Image (tube, grey):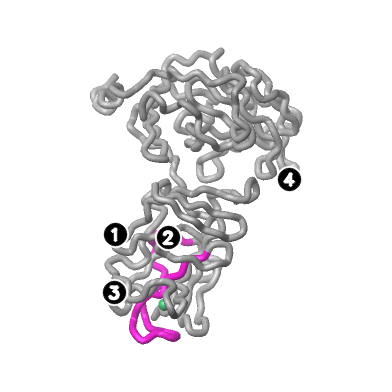
């Protein structure tokens, strides 16, 4: 072990139970048997961190899900698409217990296995599932027949810790179909999971509001919980840094957004990753921009002196999209900022702390009908 690694490891080991986690074999709750992403009971009961030792993994401990398939990262590096030929067998990655085996529209026939090392593995888009909930499986055992979509044969594969996906490439060498021989340090930080490898490299586990990266949660259920603290720093930005609120949302005049002000021609930033769906003069809004995000969110920016983006353009959180102005119905240079969810306006203060210029430390419950409710973490 090199010196740098020892430095990282020592404080963690004090609170680490070494893979002492035993998955339950027959006592899965209905929620565990129906939802792909769900916390693993007891996983962090002993401490907020544990290690998974892959330094001594032997060939019999492990199987690549499709031994002859070609793996490509997808869904923002949270999944692998492993393509192969029709009728191939999907193999369990490690010994484990089947926690879920059913059809979910967004994933087709899907299997989730829970393993003694604390990880869960997900195998989706199967033509046929070959195992039942509660069944014990061995590494390399056939759990499904490969399916796919749109005439292509592939398995959609993901690795989860406590219901959160981790980048499979943190663990797997996808070209060699092998494990990286390393010790993984898995930490629970609030609702987030952080995975550190020997090199100290961080795995991507956080969310974004990028519509191309996040799938539609309402294909699976009518409500969806979004912890804003899981959105990584690089995936959000306060739209007008250094500003103050000159007119809040709502009130007697039913203000549809919040007015925030700095100075004329100041830079306006995209609040989240997304795609521009409007960029033009629009009635009283003046020069207006609307950006579409994941989960049904949109943000609206108006009264700009100039817009720098075009309809259809992809933008990153923090990208300069326009300059503050007073076009449309405005008596002073400011940004009128609106937040929409599934076509309905809601108070931008639900997302942003206007004083701290940061995301609120809340978990939102989003419903398919367009309701947004918020609870402090
Ligand atoms: Zn306004």
> What residue did someone put label 4 on?
150
88, 239: nearer the viewer: 239
Q: Position of residue 360 (x, y in %)?
A: 37, 55
Separation (CA) of disc 2 from disc 1: 13 Å
Separation (CA) of disc 2 from disc 3: 21 Å
> What residue did someone put label 1 on?
356
Q: Find residue 100 and report its image quarter.
A: top right
Separation (CA) of disc 4 from disc 2: 39 Å
At 53% across and 32% down in the image, what residue appears?
159
Question: Which element type, helix, strand or loop, lies under badge 1?
Answer: loop
Q: Which residues are magenta?
A: 315-340
Whichever of callouts 3 and 4 sits on the residue coming sooner in the sequence is 4
Quadrant in the picture for the N terminus? top left
Is residue 38 depicted above or below 355 in this figure?
above
Whichever of callouts 1 and 4 sits on the residue coming sooner in the sequence is 4
Whichever of callouts 3 and 1 sits on the residue coming sooner in the sequence is 3
Question: Which element type, helix, strand or loop, lies under badge 3?
Answer: loop
Q: Position of residue 67 (x, y in %)?
A: 62, 24
Q: Quadrant of ligand 1?
A: bottom left
């Amino acid at each position: 072990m090199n010196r740098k690694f020892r430095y990282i490891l020592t404080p963690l080991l004090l609170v680490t139970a070494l893979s002492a986690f035993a998955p339950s074999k027959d006592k899965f709750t209905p929620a565990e048997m129906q939802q792909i992403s769900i916390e693993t009971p007891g996983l962090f009961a002993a401490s907020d961190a544990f290690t998974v030792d892959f330094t001594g993994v032997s060939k019999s401990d492990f199987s690549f899900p499709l031994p002859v398939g070609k793996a490509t990262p997808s869904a923002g590096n949270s999944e692998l698409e492993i393509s192969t030929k029709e009728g191939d067998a999907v193999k369990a990655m490690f010994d484990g217990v089947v926690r879920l085996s059913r059809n979910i529209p967004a994933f087709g026939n899907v299997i989730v296995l829970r393993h003694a090392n604390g990880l869960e593995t997900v195998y989706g888009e199967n033509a046929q599932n070959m195992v039942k909930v509660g069944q014990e499986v061995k590494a390399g055992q056939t759990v499904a027949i490969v399916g796919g979509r749109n005439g292509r044969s592939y398995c959609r594969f993901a690795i989860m810790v406590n219901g959160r996906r981790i980048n499979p490439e943190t663990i797997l060498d996808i070209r060699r179909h092998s494990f990286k021989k390393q010790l993984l340090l898995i930490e629970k930080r609030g609702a987030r999971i952080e995975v550190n490898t020997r090199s100290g490299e961080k795995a991507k586990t956080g969310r974004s509001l990028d519509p191309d990266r996040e799938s539609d949660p309402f294909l699976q259920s009518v409500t969806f919980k979004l912890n804003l603290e899981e959105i990584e720093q690089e995936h959000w930005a306060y739209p007008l840094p250094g500003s103050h609120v000159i007119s809040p949302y709502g009130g007697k005049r039913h203000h549809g957004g919040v007015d925030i002000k700095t100075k004329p021609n100041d830079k306006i930033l995209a609040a989240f990753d997304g795609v521009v769906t409007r960029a033009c003069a629009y009635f009283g809004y003046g020069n207006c921009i609307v950006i579409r995000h994941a989960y049904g969110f949109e943000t609206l920016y108006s009264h700009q002196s100039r817009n720098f983006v075009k309809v259809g353009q992809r933008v990153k959180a923090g990208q300069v999209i326009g300059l503050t102005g007073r076009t449309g119905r405005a008596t002073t240079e400011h940004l009128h900022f609106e937040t929409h969810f599934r076509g309905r306006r809601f108070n931008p203060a639900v997302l942003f702390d206007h004083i701290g210029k940061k995301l609120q430390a809340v978990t939102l419950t989003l419903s398919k009908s367009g309701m947004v409710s918020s609870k402090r973490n």
